[in-house]
């Protein structure tokens, strides 16, 4: 069985509210594969900022695969305008719920949100996962998540020991971390894990100052669950390496001009 892998599509940087452009974009992504139906496509989060556009792209790509597995990334929670804040009642998780319901209407698409799925004898588990925040000041100054993810109309305020003063933010990042951790803590042995957030610090491919925003429990999960493969995104850098017997794979498209020679990575799984 073959897995085709992509993450960090960021569709609205390539085609925004234009279905003709999205069709062209989809064909470009799978140009070498268009005369054949392939096994599985994995999309490891950050599809884009607008559900209608994202679902249309997924519907186009799904025509070339028997099965498509998707999970969400941080950008799939962003609400970038007053129009979308109103539409989703200042709650990014209403947007995520809508997205999940929309893609699950496509027959061969599975949205992974903490459940295990077996397909052709291979077990898959997926969720977006999240990073741990130790300094709200650093996080809110560095990550757009603090500005564009919401779960209520009023801002939160919090002071951490190293922050010294309260920082406003729009959603409970600590609650999201705990919810995602609870999902993966229920996981037992599985073959392939799919997440948006990287499972371990990869400072050799990513600026060491940014390793703050990786999940801190990936190594323990790999030891406990013993997956053959962990597919992820978020870092916009291609990764293919072994870690404690697990293949770590990231194949991001990223923003325009970041990965100009990008192709969808194909991996054999037995």
Image (spheres, helix red, strand yellow):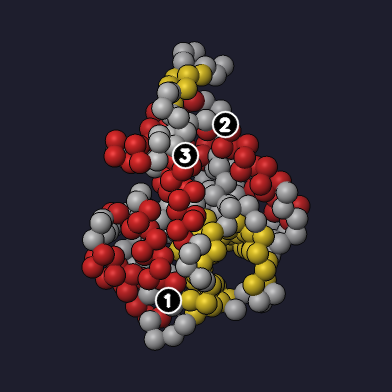
Q: CA distance from mark 1 to mark 3?
A: 37 Å
User: Circle 3 — which element?
Assistant: helix
Q: Residue at x 44, y 37 (%)?
A: 91
Secondary element at image label 1: loop
From the image, which quarter does the N terminus lie in? bottom right
Q: Which residue is mark 1?
A: 63
Q: Residue at x 52, y 36 (%)?
A: 212
Q: Earlier in the sequence, mark 2 or mark 1?
A: 1
In space, the residues marked 2 and 1 are separated at their CA atoms by: 38 Å
In the rendered image, the residue lying farthest to the top is 164
Say which label, 3 or 2, has the lower sequence index.
2
Write down the quadrant of residue 241 in the picture.
bottom right
Where 262 sits versus 235, above or below?
Answer: below
Residue 31: name its quadrant: bottom left
Q: Look at mark 2 in the image and give the residue it sits on.
A: 174
- Position of residue 224 in the picture relative to residue 269 (left or right): right
Q: Which residue is at a point 56% across and 37% down the rendered structure image? A: 176
Q: Is residue 110 left or right of residue 155?
A: right
Numbered disc 2: secondary structure: helix
Q: State yes or no: discs 1 and 3 in contact (Cβ < 8 Å).
A: no
Q: Which residue is mark 3?
A: 210
Q: Nearer the viewer, mark 3 or mark 2?
A: 2
Which of the two discs, 1 and 3, sits closer to the camera? 1
CA separation, marks 3 and 2?
Answer: 18 Å
């Amino acid at each position: 069985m073959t897995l085709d892998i992509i993450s960090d599509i960021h569709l609205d940087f390539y085609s925004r509210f234009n279905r003709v452009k999205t069709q062209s974009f989809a064909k470009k992504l799978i140009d070498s594969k268009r005369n054949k139906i392939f096994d599985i496509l994995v999309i490891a989060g950050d599809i884009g900022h607008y559900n209608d556009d994202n679902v249309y792209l997924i519907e186009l790509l799904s025509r070339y695969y028997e099965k498509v597995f998707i999970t969400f990334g941080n950008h799939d929670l962003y609400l970038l305008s007053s129009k979308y804040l109103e539409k989703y009642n200042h709650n990014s998780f209403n947007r995520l719920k809508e997205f999940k319901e929309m893609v699950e209407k496509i027959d061969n698409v599975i949205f992974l949100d903490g459940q295990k799925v077996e397909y052709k004898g291979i077990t898959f588990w997926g969720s977006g996962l999240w990073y741990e925040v130790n300094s709200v000041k650093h996080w809110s100054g560095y990550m757009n998540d603090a500005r564009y993810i919401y779960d209520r109309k009023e801002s939160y305020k919090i002071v951490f020991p190293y922050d010294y003063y309260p920082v406003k933010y729009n959603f409970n990042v600590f609650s999201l971390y705990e919810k995602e951790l609870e999902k993966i803590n229920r996981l037992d042995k599985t073959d392939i894990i799919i997440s948006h957030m990287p499972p371990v610090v990869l400072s050799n491919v990513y600026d060491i100052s940014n390793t703050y925003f990786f999940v801190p429990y990936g190594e323990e999960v790999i030891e406990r669950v013993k997956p053959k493969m962990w597919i992820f995104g978020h870092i916009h850098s291609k990764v293919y390496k072994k870690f404690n017997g697990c293949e770590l794979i990231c194949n991001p498209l990223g923003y325009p001009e970041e990965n100009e020679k990008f192709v969808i990575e194909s991996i054999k799984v037995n």
